Amino acid sequence: MIPTEDASARKREIEEKLKQEQETLSFVRENLEKSDQLTKGMVSILSSFESRLMQLENSIIPVHKQTENLQRLQENVDKTLLCMDHVISYYHVAKDTDRIIREGPTGRLDEYLSCIAKIQKAVEYFQDNNPDSPELNTVKARFEKGKELLEAEFRSLLNRYSKPVPPILILDCISMDEEVEVQEEVVLEHLPETVLQDIICIAGWLTDYGRNQDFMNVYFQIRSTQLDRSIKGLKDHFRKNSASSGILYSPAVQTKRKDTPTKKTPKRPGKDDALDVEIDSYIHCISAFVRLAQGEYALLTEVIPEHHQKKTFDSLIQEALDNLMLEGDNIVSAARRAIMRHDYSAVLTIFPILRHLKMNKSEFDSTLQGTAASTKNKLPALIASMETIGAKALEEFADSIKNDPDKEYNMPKDGTVHELTSNAILFLQQLLDFHETAGAMLASQESSSSSSSYTSDFNKRLLSSYICKVLGNLQLNLLSKSKVYEDQALSAIFLHNNYNYILKSLEKSDLIQLVTVTQKRAEMSYRELIEQQIGMYQRSWLKVTENLTDRNIPVLLPGSKLKDKERQVIKDKFKGFNDGLEELCKIQKGWAIPDKEQRDFIRHAQKKVVSDAYRAFLHRCANMSFTKNPEKYHKYRPEEVEEMIEKLFDTSA
């Protein structure tokens, strides 16, 4: 049971809390009522605002739509005005561009092309919108006039600034191409850069808008003339300067040459310096053509549309190429005429040219790539022509060596080297300088195999066979000529001199290496021939030395005297020796052996044979009293005999 005091306290506590809660509830009610009032007020305000907004919207939207229509109308008006201005401008184009078109494009190409563009647009406008209007004819005429002046400017710029390339500059370029060291690269500037850009610009416009290809004809005609003039200028430079000064290259470019076309052709019998210049000039002109044509093609690709470039280039190079080929044909014709006169050495003029043409053929073909077949075939045709006439000359030369007549008046009286021998060897030596060209020349005439099968070794064997044929023909002819001499000893000296000259010349010029390709014993064969002729010559002394033999010499016993017949035998021997010695020395002193080594060898051998026999003879006759006047018969001491023989083959003695 809860105590009474505690229950009272608990009750009071509950009553207090109840009272507090009632107060809080009363506060909340009051606030809720206030909130309801505020809400009602806000709803009323919002309702009023919404009503006003609806009224405003109903007023503004019509105004907005009206304004939008007005703006659209304004834009249409502006566009119409702009369009009208644009259309009206076409009607003023002719007037606005009249002065600039009349004055032409010189010096203001960009402005001029801008005017042409305006005229072109006007033409397009009237064609599309008013094709019957007189304005169309006006702007059309103005456009044609503008195009005509552009074409004239194109021609004028090309004519004014296209100049022949100076010969010195061409030569420097060639030297650069020939793999030599140059201080600086040589650049060919065919046209000033600013001028070139104007020409390119005009060509581009004429191609795109001018619908006219005449400018391409103008281009190749003008550049063709300059190309031909450049090469002719180089040729004139050679004629004026090479013979006198020999200076053909610019001193500004120091070069170290390897094997340039300026290498002089070896001298041939009767060859003159003027011909040297012509050959050298032609070789340089071939190189110049290739170099200049390459430059022309590079320039042309910047100016001429791609699909017209090859045809235009073909036309551009024709005049210069034809002139070069004509000159080559003239060289062939001159060689042909010389061969008909039996001047076979004239073929040597062809060799340096032919070698140069073949060395440069691949670059030549590359330069002419894409041109017409008739253009590309010109050089091969010239090469074939040169090879044919060259091979013909070689064969006829070999026959001429074999058939050279034995003319007594043409034989050297001293038995020295015949002109036929020296000319033949000189010809072969010069042939050696062009051995590859000569071998290929002979091979080109072979019908047994196709040209594609030719090799360097094959050509070398052909040339070796040819040289051996010439030498064989020469040997046969010399043998025939030697029979013209009545004196067999002189005949032997003649053959000895010629054989020795041939052998020494072969060895000195390396011809012997080429000969031994097909004749291994050639050198030995010539040595045997030389020894054989020395032996033949030495037999001429038998009529002298046979007087010194023991035959018929009496044997003198101690205390006995020679009989008259025996004394006469000894006298005859002395007289026969003396007369024979004097006669031979007198005759043979006028003979010649140009080779000192051979001359000394033959003298020494003959001195020994004669001197030894003479000393032995004198020794045998020393104690024989065969005459009261011994000095009449014993005219010469052995030393004097040697001195007499030492003076043989010496026309100055």
Image: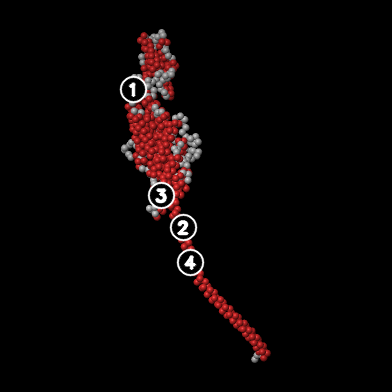
Circle 2: element type: helix
Give the residue number, with chain letter if any, for mark 2: 81
Where residue 66 is drawn, which disc sits there? 4
Contact (Cβ within 8 Å) of mark 3 with mark 4: no
Where residue 297 is drawn, which disc sits there? none
| Mark 3 or mark 1: whose residue is earlier in sequence | 3
Give the residue number, with chain letter if any, for mark 1: 407
Amino acid beneath label 1: Lys
Q: Residue at x 44, y 51 (%)?
A: 92
CA neighbours of label 2 inside 10 A, class few (<14), some (14 to 19), many (20+): few
In front: label 4 or label 1: 4
Q: Position of residue 555 (x, y in %)?
A: 38, 13
Q: Position of residue 154 (x, y in %)?
A: 43, 43
Where residue 138 is drawn, which disc sits there? 3
Circle 3: element type: helix
| Mark 2 or mark 3: whose residue is earlier in sequence | 2
Circle 4: element type: helix
Relative to residue 5, is residue 459 drawn left or right? left
Contact (Cβ within 8 Å) of mark 4 with mark 1: no
Amino acid beneath label 2: Leu
Q: Position of residue 463 (x, y in %)?
A: 36, 34
In the displayed orientation, state which residue is furthest to the left.
Answer: 448
Give the spatial CA distance, label 2 vs label 3: 25 Å
In the depicted view, which residue is nearer to us: 314 or 461? 314
Amino acid beneath label 3: Thr
